[in-house]
Image (cartoon, helix red, strand yellow):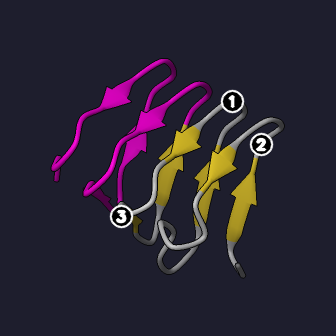
């Protein structure tokens, strides 16, 4: 995806990322069914579960974002 940067070892479902710019740090995991909107930054080792919507946010390292979070 244009405008999406993945860190080393990051796993992101292609359906999960919306419009960039989006930065997904090393060791992150983004599950299908979630949406990362523009200006989202995930620091290292962040887990984004299903049905999550994040945009214009910085999520610091080692954070778990539970299902259905907005």
Which of the two discs, 1 and 3, labels the residue nearer the N terminus?
A: 1
Whether residue 22 is situated above or below residue 59 in the rendered picture: below
**Number of other residues with Cα within 10 Å of mark 1, as a class: few under 14, some 14 to 19, many 20 or more:** some
Q: Earlier in the sequence, mark 3 or mark 2?
A: 2
Quadrant in which the N terminus appears: bottom right
Residue matched to label 2:
7
Q: Is residue 4 left or right of residue 60?
A: right
Distance in Å between CA atoms under marks 3 and 2: 21 Å
Instruction: Give the prevailing secondary structure in the magenta stretch.
Output: loop
**Disc nearest the viewer among 2 and 1:** 1
Q: Which residue is mark 1?
A: 27
Tag 3 residue: 33
Rendered residue at 68%/67% (across/down): 4
Say whether marks 2 and 1 touch (CB < 8 Å): yes
Crowdedness near tag 2: few (<14), some (14–19) or many (≥20) residues, C-alpha within 10 Å: some
Residue 40 in picture, x, y percent from top left:
46, 57
Residue located at (25% from left, 57% from top): 51
Secondary structure of the residue carrying numbered label 2: loop
At a point 66% along the width and 39% down the height, the residue shown is 25
Give percent across and percent down for residue 45: 58, 25
Please provide the residue range marked out in magenta: 43-70
Mark 2 and mark 1 lie on one chain; the one further toward the N terminus is: 2
Q: CA distance from mark 2 to mark 1?
A: 7 Å
Per the rendering, the mark at residue 48 is none
**Which type of secondary structure does the marked residue at label 3 adopt?**
loop
Task: State the separation of the CA atoms marked 1 and 3.
Answer: 19 Å
Q: Is residue 50 left or right of residue 25?
A: left
| x and y percentages locating residue 41 in the rendered image | 52, 48
| Labelled pair 1, 3 in contact (Cβ < 8 Å) | no
């Amino acid at each position: 995806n244009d405008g999406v940067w993945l860190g080393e070892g990051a796993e992101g479902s292609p359906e999960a990322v919306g419009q960039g710019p989006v930065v997904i740090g090393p060791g992150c995991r983004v599950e299908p069914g979630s949406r990362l909107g523009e200006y989202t930054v995930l620091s290292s080792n962040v887990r984004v579960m299903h049905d999550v919507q994040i945009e214009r946010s910085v999520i610091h390292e080692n954070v778990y974002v539970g299902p259905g979070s907005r």
